[in-house]
Amino acid sequence: MIVAPSTRMQSVPVSGPGTVLFVIFMLGGVAGAAVLRNPIPAFAGALLGFYCLFSVKVVNQWEKVALLRLGKYRGLRGPGMIWIIPVVDTLSAYVDQRIRVTDVSAESALTRDTVPVNVDAIIFWVVWNAEKSILEVANFAEAVSLGAQTALRECIGRHELAQLLTERERQARIILGDAETQISNKFAEAALVYRDNPVALHLRAMNMLYEAIKEKGSMVIVPSSAVETMGLGGMLATTTLAKNQ
């Protein structure tokens, strides 16, 4: 999937601060002309207002922009408010330097043993050098996407299908091993608790036996030694006597 470049052009030639300065100078010029009864302050205010209107630009915190003076690169500007010379200076596209996410699809890439596979990937990338991205690449976002697709196809082409599957099986075994380790640690902690508290062990054994026989139609065979160890014989006898009374 090819994404459009994450840059913004100066679609609106004026900015908020430029508009405010334009209004201030225009009102100031009109007021001066009214006080002095002379149109010169009004003309001066209008000129200064229009100059600020088109010369004041705002660059966001996460952006950089290249300043071109008569077509020649003069350096990066931003973030914050910048001043340019109208007509003489121009600004490039605003380059977003935040981390971006691009979906990469290898479509039908062939493995080393010519087996077609479909692999999707996601890449996280950031514009580290805004100057080179503006001056040396026409569309750096498209270049990143196409380069990632090519790299993914080359990576798949260097391996056979069995090797790709063995990496997936290995990851599954690692996850299963981590789960077994966590379970064994919990069992070890429980064993320490049961070792120091036989009553808790008996209650746990009784609960396990109850969970096994509570379903209708189920039958569980329990050795007599286990019954004696858990003390179930005396408990069952006491329950029977209590029912008969």
Image (tube, rainbow, N blue to C red):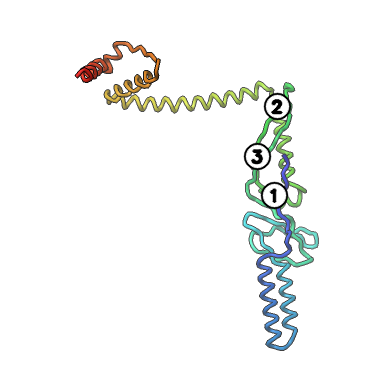
Name the quadrant containing residue 168. top right
Q: Which residue is mark 1?
A: 6
Lower position in the chain sequence, tag 3 or tag 1: 1
Q: Amino acid at mark 2?
A: Val
Alpha-carbon span between mark 3 and mark 2:
19 Å
- Element class at badge 1: loop
Q: Which residue is mark 3?
A: 123
| Mark 3–mark 1 CB contact (< 8 Å) | no
Lower position in the chain sequence, tag 1 or tag 2: 1
Report crowding for label 2: few under 14, some 14 to 19, many 20 or more residues within 10 A (C-alpha): some
**x, y percent for residue 160:** 69, 22
Residue at image coords 76%, 58%: 73
Residue at image coords 53%, 26%: 174
Q: Amino acid at mark 1?
A: Ser
**x, y percent for residue 78:** 66, 59
Q: Which residue is mark 2?
A: 117
Residue at image coords 73%, 71%: 51
Going by the image, does 212 lie left or right of 31? left
Mark whose residue sits in front, 3 or 2: 2
- Residue 177 is marked as none
Residue at image coords 66%, 70%: 20
**x, y percent for residue 164:** 65, 25
Report crowding for label 3: few under 14, some 14 to 19, many 20 or more residues within 10 A (C-alpha): few
Q: Residue furthest right?
A: 70
Which one is in front, 84 or 215?
215
